[in-house]
Amino acid sequence: MVTKFIERKVYYPGQKVFSEGEDGNRAYVVERGLIEISKNLPDGSEKILGTIGAGGIFGEMALIDNQPRMATARAVQESTCIFISRQTFEDKLRRTDPFIKGLLSIFVRNIRNLTQDKLKK
């Protein structure tokens, strides 16, 4: 019998959780703290897309569509995050209705496209 446990990590203010362009092998749930999501712009500046607080999830898009991270995640304050591994996510997704899987893929594609379009303006 395999015992499963929850993996957690503490991130300190300014510490990156992941960087834009990296492969996404896990999603994160914020247990406590605040995570900032930002995007690099073509002119070299950075745009803050939003923040994720306790109970929020981030990094899930890369698990759904197997694309590189579209943004950078960084701790704004000391934050504890719980990991959801690709394996756990895929195990759960395999047991999901195909309609829901398709819908998730469409949502992620739309979010990526909308984000890219908005940043171009």
Image (spheres, rainbow, N blue to C red):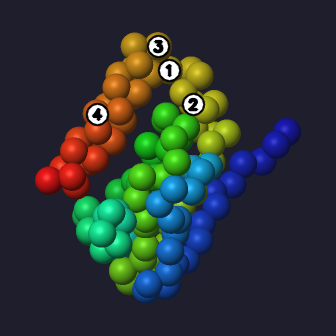
Q: Earlier in the sequence, mark 4 or mark 1?
A: 1
Residue 55 visible, this orientation? no
- Which residue occupies 60% across, 66% down? 8
**In this view, which residue lies farthest toward the left?**
121
Q: CA distance from mark 3 to mark 4?
A: 18 Å
Q: Which residue is mark 4?
A: 110
Residue placed under numbered mark 3 in the picture: 98
C-alpha gap between disc 2 and disc 4: 22 Å
Secondary element at tag 4? helix
- Find the distance from the CA under tag 2 to the CA under tag 1: 7 Å
Gap between marks 3 and 1, in whole Å?
Answer: 6 Å
Foreground: 82 or 71?
71
Q: Are marks 3 and 1 in contact (CB under 8 Å)?
A: yes
Q: CA distance from mark 4 to mark 1?
A: 21 Å
- Which residue corresponds to the image point at 47% horizontal and 60% vertical from the top-left? 20
Mark 3 residue crowding within 10 angstroms, few (<14) / some (14–19) / many (20+): few
Compared across the picture, whether 46 is left or right of 71 comes to left
Residue ID at (48%, 52%):
69
Residue that numbered label 1 is attached to: 96
Q: In the image, what residue type sits under mark 4?
A: Asn
- Residue 86 appears left or right of 79: right
Q: Work out how far the residue at label 3 is from the one at label 2, CA to CA, in angstroms.
A: 12 Å
Identify the residue at the far right of this view: 1
